[in-house]
Amino acid sequence: MQVNKLLLMSQPQIGNLIREIRLETGLTQEQFASQLGVTCSTMNRWERGRSKPSPLALQKIEQLLEQMSATDLLAKYLAD
């Protein structure tokens, strides 16, 4: 599981990853937030790098990436 590595990412990196995932899925912030069980304002804060998702939210994001077969997107952000 990559969640531990995601926790080490900076706020801007996580925000960029979340935004890219959302755009790949073609969802609005509100729709994507609903899928993750958070509010639209929370999603907005994440994307703008003002706060970081909780470990549980990161786990949901990782599961969504796996469902999308977009693990290469995750690898792009986790490359050493």
Image (cartoon, rainbow, N blue to C red):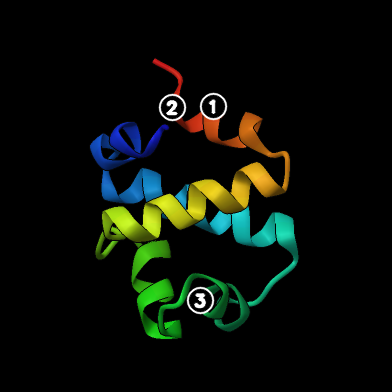
Q: Earlier in the sequence, mark 3 or mark 1?
A: 3
Question: Relative to residue 30, is residue 42 drawn left or right?
Answer: left
Residue at 45% in and 77% down? 37
The mark total stands at 3
Q: Residues within 10 Å of mark 3 (few under 14, many from 20)?
A: some
Please tell me whether mark 2 sits on a helix, a strand or a loop: helix
Q: Residues within 10 Å of mark 2 (few under 14, many from 20)?
A: some
Q: Which of marks 3 and 2 is nearer the N terminus?
A: 3
Residue for badge 2: 78
Q: Distance between the residues labelled 2 and 1?
A: 5 Å
Q: Residues within 10 Å of mark 1 (few under 14, many from 20)?
A: few
Which quadrant would residue 71 be assigned to in this image?
Answer: top right
Q: What residue type is labelled 1?
A: Ala
Residue at 42% in and 32% down? 1
Residue for badge 1: 75
Q: Is residue 78 above or below residue 11?
A: above
On the image, the x and y values in percent for residue 34 come to 54, 80
Residue at 27% in and 59% down? 54
Work out which residue is located at the far top of the displayed protein and give it. Answer: 80
Q: Which amino acid does label 2 sit on?
A: Leu
Residue for badge 3: 33
Q: How far apart are marks 3 and 2 (CA)?
A: 23 Å
